[in-house]
Image: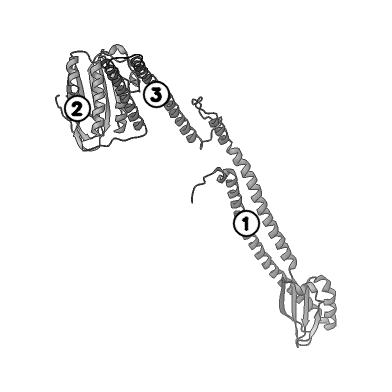
Amino acid sequence: MTACPTPLCSHSIGARLSKKLALFTMLVLGVLFAVTWGMVKMILVERNAGDLKSRCALISDVVSRASSGGEVALMARLVADAPMRARTHLEVRRADGSLLYADARSESLERSEHTRVHDFRIETPALGGGFVQARYTVDYADDAALGRRWALILVGVTLAAGAIVFAGTHWHVRRGLRPLADLAAQTRSISPRALDRRLALSDPAEELLPWIEQFNALMSRLERAYAQLEGFNADVAHELRTPLATLIGETELALARERPAAELAETLHSNLEELRRLAALVNDMLFLSQADRGAVARRGAPVSLAAVAAEVVDFHEAACDEAGLAVRIEGDAVLPVDEPLFRRALSNLIGNALRFAEQGSTVVVRIAPEAADRVAVEVQNRGAEIDAAALPRLFDRFFRGDASRCCDDGEQHHGLGLAIVAAIARMHAGATLAESRGGITRVGFTLAVEGRSTAGTMPA
């Protein structure tokens, strides 16, 4: 069964519940009334049978008494009692089978389907043969008509009960679902300019509370994401505006008048550097976008993280020598990781530490199990402390700390390095960590363990 593609296939919860409850009520009442009517019918049949026996007993007594006066007296008594036997018919025959007496048979009695016949013998010692044979026919059509009326009444009561239950349930359900209409009205008031609004009910139903809490939590996440998106767009525009303005200005200046080939080549080289920075910025933004969409690291075979860290340190050797810094690797862990991503994250951390470390100090790359299922990788440097208020934002995109902490290396950094570290940590089911106190700053990330890990120490 396929889902309904259009709103025309929607249904009313109140109407559906009301119909089901009304049908259920009618079914229950119908069964109860049918059982009740069957029992009443049985009682009426038993009562009619008892009534027929009592009538026959009375007739036997009357005939037995009247027969003492002979056939004439007996017939006179039966004729006198005939009006009291309405809707009945009595026949009395002699012992030889000849008819002694018969009531006038009514046409309705002959046609009725509800007649009962009882044949019985009456002792009459005063008459010839010593007994008479009687047949008594009784019509119970009135009782049958009463039963039919009661059946119609029960059917009517069942239908009326279903209608009343439907109307009452529909009204009650619509009243009970009124909070949903209030929630729908509140959701319609939410817009990109009013993302801070949350759902609330003056008298919230217990069943709606989980939905309200989940929706409000979703709106909180959406509000944060929207704020981050707006900030990200503004930061991107700001980051792209300066290099683009530089490129446009230099190009316009180069085209303003005739210039020798050497000057044009120098202009092209300068523009190429700006374009490379723009390309790096765009690539970093694309990488972060993929990470935000839930990309997962493709882990390879288990590798020694200390060995990979040593290769990354070798890549930064020139920068270390220029800054007069040393790098030491402490600890090790062997586990499967996405090696290119791990190199990139660690390179960003080491590059960040080299820019902020005090000259002549040692930068420490520490690798150690943080828990049974997690390994921590952090880079520690000595230098100016990071403000505690800035630590939570350290891994935000385009966030830059206090410029006084950084040495002047003449390079421009667009502020996505630590954001990329955070994205790589998430892709490895890990998290970021940052701490700065007592002149020591530790920045790093954790990796979820997949496989066996061992600890050790590898010098750089």
Answer few, some or many: residues within 10 Å of disc 3's Cα (few below 14, many 20 plus, some between 14 and 19).
some
* Image mark for residue 309: 2
Question: Is residue 64 something one can see in this rendering?
Answer: no
Which residue is nearer to you in this view: 290 or 224? Answer: 290
Image depth: mark 2 or mark 3 in front: 3
Q: Is residue 248 above or below residue 112?
A: above
Write the residue at 60% across / 40% down: 174
State which quarter of the image contains the C terminus: top left
What is the quadrant of residue 445 in the picture? top left
Q: Secondary structure at mark 2?
A: helix
Q: Amino acid at mark 1?
A: Gly
Q: Secondary structure at mark 1?
A: helix
Q: Amino acid at mark 2?
A: Ala
The answer for how far apart the CA atoms under marks 2 and 1 are is 82 Å
Write the residue at 55% across / 36% down: 180
The x, y position of residue 223, in whole percent, is: 45, 26
Given contact means CB atoms under 8 Å apart, are the residues at marks 2 and 1 in contact? no
* Image mark for residue 148: none
In the image: residue 287, left or right of residue 102: left
Q: Which residue is mark 1?
A: 30
Answer few, some or many: residues within 10 Å of disc 1's Cα (few below 14, many 20 plus, some between 14 and 19).
some
* Image mark for residue 232: 3
Answer few, some or many: residues within 10 Å of disc 2's Cα (few below 14, many 20 plus, some between 14 and 19).
many
Write the residue at 24% across / 30% down: 342
What is the quadrant of residue 301 in the picture? top left
